[in-house]
Every structure is written in C-alpha cells, then in structure tokens.
Amino acid sequence: MRRTYHIRNYVAWLTLVPLLVMAVSMAFFFLHDRFQSMDQDLSVRGHLIAHQLASSSEYGVYANNQDFLENIAQGVLQQDDVSAVTILNEHNETLVVLHKAGRNVSSKLGTLSGSDRYLKIYESINATQVTLDDADDKPQPKQIGTVIVEMSWAHIHRLKLQLLWLAVAVTIIFLIVVFYLVYLSSRRIATPIGVLSDAVRDIGAGNLDMRVSIDTKINELATLARGINDMASQLQHERAILQQRIDDATMQLRSLAFYDTLTQLPNRRMLEDRLAQAISVSNRTGNYGAIMFIDLDNFKPLNDIHGHACGDLLLIEAARRITSCIRSIDTVARFGGDEFVVLIGQLTADSAISVEEVVAIAEKIRIALSRVYELRCVEPGQGGGIIEHQCTSSIGISLFLDDELSRDDILTRADKAMYKAKEQGRNQVCLYQMPSHK
C-alpha cells in the first residue's frame, strides 16, 4: 500500500526546504565575502607597515646602525597582528631580527609567501638619490636592504570563527522563527482540512448526521465545508426517502404474506401462526380456546346477479361486523371466498363456562351477519344504486385444551361443525363436541 503523509508535513517541507537552502546559501556567501575582505585587509595593512618600515630603515641600513634599526623594528612589532620583523642588508645579511614571545623566526630568506598561521611580506629598502638638475634623468633606485614583516593570522582566524558561529546562530534562529510561523500557518490550513477529511470518512462510513464546523478565514475551505454539509443533508434526505420506500414495501410484502388484500384481515397463514401460539398458551395456563368456522349463506346469488364488485362490498362489511363482535385479543381471519375463521383465546379452565362464552360470541356474530346489507354498487349498463341483500351465516365451533389436538385437527373439527350447521338449516351455530376436562 502506498504510504501517505499529512498535508501539514507537505506544507512544512515545501516551505522549510527552500528557506533552508536560501538561508544556508546566504550565510555561505556572506561569510565568504567577509573572510575575503578580512584577508585582504590584513594583507593591505601588512604591506603598509612593511613600506613604512622600509622607508624608516634606510638610514640605519646605510649607516649599519643596528640600535636605530632595533628601535624602529620594536615600534613596528608593537602593532596588532605583527608577529616578527627582520631587516637585511644588501648582501642579505641579517641586521635585526625581532619577534613576539612564542614565535620562532627563521633567518632563511625566501620569496613572498604565506601559511595557515603567518603571512610574510617583503619590502625593499631603496637608497634615496637626489637629482641636481630637473633636466637630468631620474636615477634608478638602488636596493640597499630588505625588510620582512610577518603578519599573524591568529586574530583573523578568531574573528572568522566568531563570525561563523554568529552566522550559524542567526541562521538557526531564523529557521526556528520560520518553522514556528510555518507551524502556525499550516495549522490554519491543515487543521480545517483534517476536520474535513474526518467528516468525509464518517459520511463515507454511513454517518450522515455528521456536520462540519470549522473556524477558518480561508474562503475555499469555508466553501468546501458548506458543500460537505449540503451533500450530507442531501444524502440524509435521500436515504430517508429510500428507507421510507423500503419500509412501505416491507409493509406491503408483510401485508401480502399475512393479510387478506380485500378485507385487510389476517389470512390463513397468520391464523395458523396465532393458533399455534394459542395452543401453547392453553397448554401453559390450562384454559380453553376455541375456533369458529363461519360460512356466509346466500352469498353466491349476490355475485351471480350483481357481480363480484357487490360481493366484495358485502365481504368487507361482513368482516367489519365480525370484528366488532369479538374482543381485541381475538383474531378474525378470512380463509378465502365467503369463509371466515375466528380464534377465541384465553377462555376459562371450566369447559361448560368456556362453551357458554364462545357460543354467546358466536350468536352475537350470527345476529350481526343476518342483518340486511345495504350495498352501494355500480352495475354494468344500469348505473349506481343501493342494493339490499339478506345474507345469513353458518358457524361451527371447535374447542381445544392443552396440546391434545393439532392445528389441522382443530380447524377440521370446526369445519365439520360448520357443515353440520348448514345441514340443520343454515343460520345456525353448531358445537363440534365438548372436550373432556383434564
């Protein structure tokens, strides 16, 4: 995986590296110029001293007066950076050799030369000749001796070292100040960008509640923050819409799976599930439960004469009437066609009382379903109108206790009781059997 770096590091490197190169280059050129100037100053001053000494030594060399020469040489030796003075005659014989303490002077002659510690400067001692007539040619000067002045580099080297350390210190202080300023500047850029980066990562991870709040005077960063917030809000809104659609679709699928699309009552699948729960409760509490199988009498003629639309209206009204007759804890389901099933749970542990309660509910349902139906139907070719229809019901009841019967057995018994009610003349309530008390 490719290695990445924080933007603060990039900003620091892009700023500090050029400044470091510039600072070091400026310090180098400054020191180089100053060092050359100091070397040149020492050389010029040495030549001036040697020239003055040569002029002053003319009489002493000519007269071979060593005391005189020593006096003037001693005066020269007192000047700064002068480490040794040598005066020679025209035969290169040493007349005077003076040097400061700790300096060993060689009497051997050489050409103008320098070393790391000393700079030797040679100056000729010329005899002064006076012309009697301006018209005469000026005579060539005659060399009667030589002075050698040795200039010490020690003081210059100390000054150079001090100047070097000063330049290093100034450069370091400059870089520290620049680094601090770069740090402050990079924080104003890198910190908001870091916040924006974290926000984008959180939004990408699904946290659409994330909002960016940065304190910056940089227009581009402020615009970027507003853009991220707007994007998050838009995504959140679109996700809410999508989630609502998913929830609606889920509810529709659940409704199709467990509810009748016409009456909105539970279908056979949900009834069987609730019946299994009721059997489990009966097994745990010892109380009876019951199943009613309801079939509408005289329903088919309504469909044949007035059409399925009127039949659907009657089924919807029948479902409403049945629901109004039971408790909220009970369940009404449509099995298909004109058949309804009612699950009555949490009766008593006494079989006689349970039979009495469930029969009373069944009678209430039978009476409600037997009332005349007023249906507002639209018949093909005849327009709309209110149709009155009489429709009774045949109800079969099957009680259950514990888990002595399966769901299919209970439903089969209730179905058989319903057909028995039809055989007895319809508009009847028929109990399959009285379960024995355990």
Image (tube, rainbow, N blue to C red):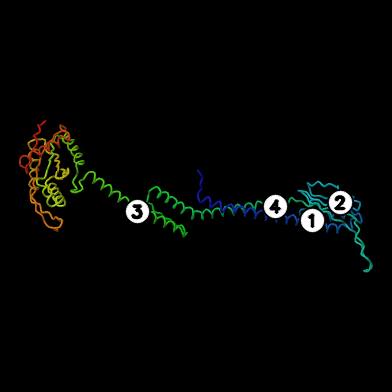
Residue under label 3, please give it. 238
Residue under label 1, please give it. 46
Q: 236 and 120: which one is in front?
A: 236
Q: What's the amino acid at mark 1? A: Gly
Q: With 142 as the anchor, is 342 left or right in this view?
A: left
Separation of residues labelled 1 and 4 (CA atoms):
18 Å
Q: What's the amino acid at mark 2? A: Val
Q: Residue 96 got which mark?
A: 2
Of labels 3 and 2, the one closer to you: 3
Residue under label 4, please give it. 160
Q: Position of residue 140 (x, y in %)?
A: 91, 61
Q: Earlier in the sequence, mark 3 or mark 2?
A: 2
Separation of residues labelled 2 and 4 (CA atoms):
33 Å
- Please report the residue visible at 44 percent of the width from the left and 59 percent of the height from the top: 223
Q: Earlier in the sequence, mark 3 or mark 4?
A: 4
Q: Position of residue 433 (x, y in %)?
A: 8, 34
- Please report the residue visible at 37 percent of the width from the left and 51 percent of the height from the top: 208
Q: With 176 as the anchor, is 87 left or right in this view?
A: right
Q: Is residue 98 above or below residue 136?
A: above
Q: What's the amino acid at mark 3? A: Glu
Contact? badges 1 and 4 (CB < 8 Å):
no
